[in-house]
Image: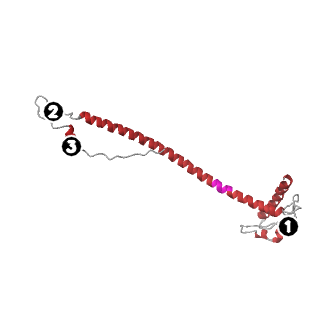
Amino acid sequence: MINEFKYTEQREYDDSKILKCCPEPKPNPSDPPSSDCCYNTWQAELDVVNWELKEVTNELTHAKKHLTLVTTRYTRLKLWDEELSSANELAFAVCRQLEIIEAQLVNICKNTQFTVKGVEILEYRESFGGQVRDPAWLAQFTAKHHGDALVLTGDIRNISGATLSSKHITGGVKRLLSTYAIAVTSG
């Protein structure tokens, strides 16, 4: 709720109003002049101004409180929006990775014997060990199925300089075969 505040320009000092209020007294020796000419009128105006000042001060206080609440709410909502946007980006990245895993799972295990038909390295960013993309090395996984040992330096040759890559590709194929076996038997 936003209140509209109106500003009215103050009137200039009007000498004629004072003269109408306080006409020049005629000299009367029995009644000496007093200093409270039009005091009641000025007092009434002062009361009105004081009341208006109090109202404006209350409105200002209310507006400051409202501004503080709105600013706090805006800050919270902005932070929440940033966190949700970040979470959305992460969720999208996870979903994209799951789509890639699903595609690899289908490519690896899509046959009636549930064996590996082939393995393909989509992207390899390491400076050493690019031999893992070699078709002869990848051919070691062909015809493997769930339950095969798939042991590095056993039935899978290790690549010198790419031991971790060899180990993780072997483990990945083994996990995908296991996941596919669980999916086929449970579904």
Q: What secondary structure is found at the residue carrying circle 2?
A: loop
Relative to 3, residue 155 above or below: below
Foreground mark, 2 or 3, reads: 3
Report the residue at 84% width, 68% height from top.
139
| The residue stretch that appears in magenta | 86-91
**Residue that carries the numbered disc 3 in the rendered image:** 16
**Label 2: few (<14), some (14–19) or many (≥20) C-alpha neighbours in 10 Å:** few
**Which amino acid type corresponds to the residue marked 1 in the rendered image?**
Gln
Which element is circle 1 on?
helix
Q: Single out the residue that lies furthest toward the front.
A: 20
Query: Residue 117 vs residue 24: left or right?
Result: right
Mark 2 or mark 1, whichever is nearer to me? 2
Q: Is residue 177 above or below residue 77?
A: below
* Residue 170 location, quadrant: bottom right
Main SS, magenta residues: helix
Comparing 83 with 135, the one in front is 83
In the image, residue 170 lies in the stretch drawn in magenta: no
Residue 81 pos. (x, y %): 59, 52
The dot on residue 33 is: 2
Give residue 155's position: percent from left, percent from top.
87, 64
Q: Which mark is residue 140?
A: 1
Q: Which residue corresponds to the image point at 76% horizontal and 60% vertical from the top-left? A: 101
Q: Hey, which residue is sitting farthest left in the picture?
A: 29
The answer, for residue 98, to whether it is visible in the render is yes
Tell me the amino acid under the disc marked 2. Pro
Asked if residue 114 lies left or right of residue 73, the reply is right
Q: What whole-number distance in Å separates the C-alpha atoms at marks 2 and 1?
A: 122 Å
Relative depth, front residue between 58 and 15: 15
Number of marks in the image? 3
